[in-house]
Amino acid sequence: MQRRTFLKGSLAGTAVAVAVGAGLLTPRAVLAAWPKSAFKAKKIDDALAKLFGTADNTPSDKIAIKAPDIAENGAVVPVSVKASLDGVESIAILAAKNANPLTSSFSLGANALPQVSTRIKMGKTSDVIAVVKAGGKVYSARKNVKVTIGGCGG
């Protein structure tokens, strides 16, 4: 059984190597849609305008943010966003007081569940903002997360 697994893995690896060598698989094609200017923006409104085309958004109770009330380590803050809106196209997560507030952006397919989970870096205590584009409109929700120093409540 192990020999078969090894042979299947070798065959798959060879096929991928041939595809890359032939130029059929190129990482540049995947990275081309990266909204670099939105991630480099220093203000929330600038990041939203570059990402969604507008900074205008409507607060919504149909967006749920799951994040700790107190994050003992700002380098790895777990955040989950779930939206119960129809036609969700994308979800973005921002940390209001970060030097670059946009931490992550997810484009969703038509049949994808409107739910994402990730870990973000937060420099200091601030609001975590979830921004959801659904049905051509932009909605948002906020949750305050306190970042402590070394878990001591400082």
Image (cartoon, helix red, strand yellow):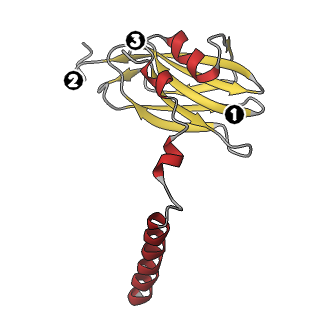
| For marks 3 and 2 on the same chain, the one whose residue lies earlier in the sequence | 3
Q: Residues within 10 Å of mark 3 (few under 14, many from 20)?
A: some
Q: Quadrant of the N terminus?
A: bottom left
Q: Residue 57, located in which quarter of the rendered image?
A: top right
Comparing labels 3 and 2, the label whose residue is closer to the camera = 3
Estimate the x, y position of residue 116 in percent, counting from the top left: 56, 37
Q: Quadrant of the C terminus?
A: top left
Q: Residues within 10 Å of mark 1 (few under 14, many from 20)?
A: many
Estimate the x, y position of residue 70 in percent, counting from the top left: 37, 21
Between the C-alphas of marks 1 and 3, the distance is 26 Å
| Left or right side of 20 for 52 | right
Comparing labels 1 and 3, the label whose residue is closer to the camera = 1
List the residue tagged with mark 2: 150
List the residue tagged with mark 1: 89
Q: Residue at x 52, y 40 (%)?
A: 32
Helix, strand or loop under label 2:
loop
List the residue tagged with mark 3: 97
- Contact between marks 3 and 2 (CB within 8 A): the answer is no
Residue type at mark 2: give it. Answer: Gly
Estimate the x, y position of residue 45 in percent, counting from the top left: 54, 10
| For marks 1 and 3 on the same chain, the one whose residue lies earlier in the sequence | 1
| Left or right side of 11 for 132 | right
Q: Residue at x 59, y 15 (%)?
A: 49
Helix, strand or loop under label 1:
strand
